[in-house]
Image (cartoon, rainbow, N blue to C red):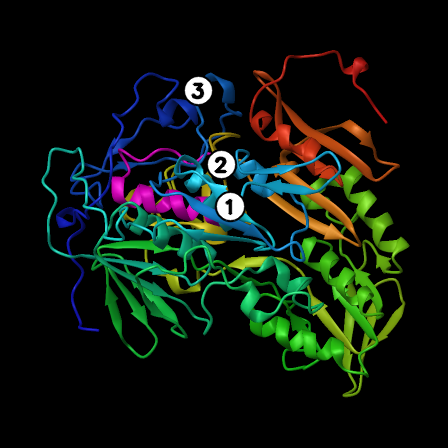
């Protein structure tokens, strides 16, 4: 690849940006008013970035303002690119777990019946093709296949769609430019696909550290380890015809933001006109755990999962200790029990999934795990590690000693931002972004030619409040990658705010757990369907705001159909009611 210095961002006008809405006016649509932050102040010599040569605002994100009255302004769902050709869909019943995500994305095509089975329309008209394709991308099990239609950015005859000039008063430049996606995961793939769908016909480069094309990570701790899914079945197939250069097995070591270039291992430089940061997270590790022991593993990548899978299948591997009470740790415990192993789940906090679901609902998960034969140790730490070659010996802070064949760490993830140190970006907890997904530097200035997406990005979701947060879920990676691509093409002053409803799922020993919103924000939990005792219920999470109780999340245990109607409630305020009249079970 030829060495080129970075193009000045203000000279780059990629084609096919599509219609740009006029900036909204009034306090209800002004991000500075909506999020309780100071009004933007101009930055000398800054540019709006990719596509629009206007001054870029600096965004002050450190605000103590309270939650937003979400129903006082419009928060649209993530935008889709319309298609003009019909498509056909098929569902692999052996892989489908009836989570109902497909019905959330395309209710005109998919429907979960009262009996818990999935019904769908095989031949999808063009008007619903984009929704059907989004359902394929968001399917947790990759159980849906889509056939026909058009590849990203192509017209009805298979030719690439002619680019539409931006509505900024400047002419579209014909020269080909380069957008680089840093990260070979789902968020990066989603951003790259959206760039092509929007008609970007320049050079598109995806840089990934792994040797594999983007694949689904959530099944690594369960369906892949159990053998239900193979390596090939993990690969995302919704965007197989993406026209891009893949630089796999390539490590990024730095970012020169002033000259717009990535620094690669070996001293190579990769200049760019636009950059999407989507490097994801790495598995957390314990500093006191034996670093070089073959009996201590994490499950973050496919390579990790293959190693753990081999250990679990070995005849000598009968006893396993799993550290971590989050979804990864709990799902690993499920998989190990399915293999007939003796499982001890060691959790520093109590109860299980406390940070995700809260104490009341998290306690239900602990009961499910114990009934399945898992030895759950809550509020417990490991104080000493001994590797005897043939086994590990762990001493707990309560004095107990555990002998096991291997340990799997399921402690969550840490943002992959080590390569951004010294770049001028704020990476205190992931890459800090403004509400449009544009990256914000250490001085609070928007970087118009750099956006971030996925697990690594921290941004304020106006559906809830002005506090920047990271969200680590598969569907979020799809939606944020798409929005980041749109924002990169439109620029900070024209891009919409990213205000999704986070959604995630899990399965604990046959019990399907689904959630929408951010349960950890809730201070009040109300069981609106079923009961905790039956372990089949819908819980609604809310918190008090100046505008009344705000619904921040809903969680369902084995009630996917009942959860569907909760999505549109997330972020909205409910009428005040007397606390004594609350329904408790």
Which mark is first along the chain, 3 or 1? 3
The quadrant of the rendering that contains the N terminus is bottom left
**Residue 303 in the image: x percent, y percent?**
57, 74
Q: Residues within 10 Å of mark 3 (few under 14, many from 20)?
A: few
Answer left or right for 208 relative to 556: left
Q: CA distance from mark 1 to mark 3?
A: 22 Å
* Residue 56, quarter of the rendered image: top left
Residue in the image at 26% along x and 47% along y:
155
> Is residue 421 among what the camera can see?
no
Determine whether the residue tagged by mark 3 lies in a helix, strand or loop.
loop
Which mark is first along the chain, 3 or 2? 3
Q: Which residue is mark 1?
A: 476
Q: Which of 103/558 is in front? A: 103
Q: Is the stretch drawn in magenta largely helix, strand or loop?
A: helix
- The magenta stretch is 476-500
Residue in the image at 87% along x and 48% along y:
367
> Which mark is drawn over residue 500?
2
**Residue 26 in the image: x percent, y percent?**
33, 16
Q: Is residue 10 above or below residue 576?
A: below
> Which mark is drawn over residue 266?
none
Q: Is residue 355 above or below residue 403?
A: above
Determine whether label 1 and label 3 are within 8 Å by CB: no
Determine whether the residue tagged by mark 2 lies in a helix, strand or loop.
loop
* Residue 516, quarter of the rendered image: top right
Answer left or right for 566 relative to 313: left
Q: Which residue is mark 3?
A: 73
Within the magenta stretch, is there residue 491? yes
């Amino acid at each position: 690849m030829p060495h080129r210095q970075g193009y000045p961002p203000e000279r780059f006008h990629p084609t096919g940006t599509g219609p740009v809405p006029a900036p909204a006016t009034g306090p209800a649509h002004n991000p500075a008013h909506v999020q309780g932050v100071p009004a933007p102040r101009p930055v000398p010599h800054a540019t709006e970035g990719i596509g629009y040569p206007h001054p870029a605002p600096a965004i002050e994100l450190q605000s103590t303002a309270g939650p937003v009255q979400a129903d006082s302004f419009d928060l649209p769902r993530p935008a889709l690119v319309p298609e003009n050709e019909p498509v056909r869909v098929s569902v692999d019943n052996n892989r489908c777990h009836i989570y109902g995500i497909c019905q959330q994305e395309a209710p005109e095509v998919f429907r979960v019946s009262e009996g818990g089975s999935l019904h769908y329309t095989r031949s999808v008209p063009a008007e619903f093709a984009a929704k059907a394709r989004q359902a394929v991308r968001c399917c947790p099990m990759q159980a849906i296949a889509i056939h026909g239609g058009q590849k990203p950015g192509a017209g009805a005859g298979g030719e690439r769609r002619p680019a539409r000039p931006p509505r900024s008063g400047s002419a579209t430049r014909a020269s080909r430019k380069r957008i680089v996606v840093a990260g070979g995961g789902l968020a990066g793939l989603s951003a790259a696909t959206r760039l092509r769908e929007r008609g970007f016909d320049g050079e598109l480069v995806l840089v990934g550290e792994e040797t594999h094309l983007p694949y689904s990570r959530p099944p690594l701790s369960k369906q892949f380890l159990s053998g239900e899914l193979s390596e090939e079945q993990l690969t995302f197939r919704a965007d197989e015809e993406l026209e891009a250069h893949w630089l796999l097995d390539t490590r990024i070591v730095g970012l020169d933001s002033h000259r717009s270039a990535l620094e690669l291992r070996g001293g190579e430089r990769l200049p760019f006109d636009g950059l999407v940061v989507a490097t994801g997270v790495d598995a957390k590790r314990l500093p006191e755990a034996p670093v070089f022991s073959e009996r201590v593993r994490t499950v973050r990548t496919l390579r990790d999962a293959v190693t753990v899978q081999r250990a679990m299948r070995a005849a000598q591997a009968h006893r396993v200790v799993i550290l971590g009470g989050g979804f990864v740790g709990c799902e690993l415990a499920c998989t190990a029990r399915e293999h007939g192993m003796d499982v001890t789940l060691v959790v520093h906090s109590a109860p299980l999934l406390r940070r995700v679901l809260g104490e009341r609902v998290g306690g239900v998960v602990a009961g499910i795990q114990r009934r399945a034969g898992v030895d759950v140790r809550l509020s417990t730490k490991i104080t000493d590690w001994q590797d005897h070659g043939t086994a590990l010996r762990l001493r707990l802070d309560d004095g107990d000693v555990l002998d096991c064949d291997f340990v799997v760490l399921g402690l969550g993830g840490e943002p992959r931002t080590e390569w951004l140190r010294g770049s001028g970006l704020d990476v205190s907890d992931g890459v800090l972004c403004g509400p449009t997904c544009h990256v914000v530097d250490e001085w609070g200035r928007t970087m118009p030619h750099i956006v971030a997406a996925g697990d690594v990005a921290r941004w304020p979701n106006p559906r809830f409040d002005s506090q920047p947060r990271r969200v680590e879920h598969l569907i979020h990676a799809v939606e944020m990658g798409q929005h980041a691509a749109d924002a990169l093409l439109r620029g900070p002053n024209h891009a919409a705010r990213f205000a999704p409803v986070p959604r995630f799922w899990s399965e604990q020993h046959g019990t399907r757990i689904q959630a929408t919103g951010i349960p950890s924000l809730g201070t009040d939990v109300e069981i609106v369907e079923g009961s905790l005792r039956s372990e089949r219920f819908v819980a609604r999470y809310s918190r008090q705001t100046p505008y009344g109780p705000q619904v921040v999340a809903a969680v369902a245990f084995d009630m996917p159909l009942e959860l569907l109607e909760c999505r549109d409630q997330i972020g909205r305020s409910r009428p005040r009611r007397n606390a004594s009249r609350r329904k408790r079970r």
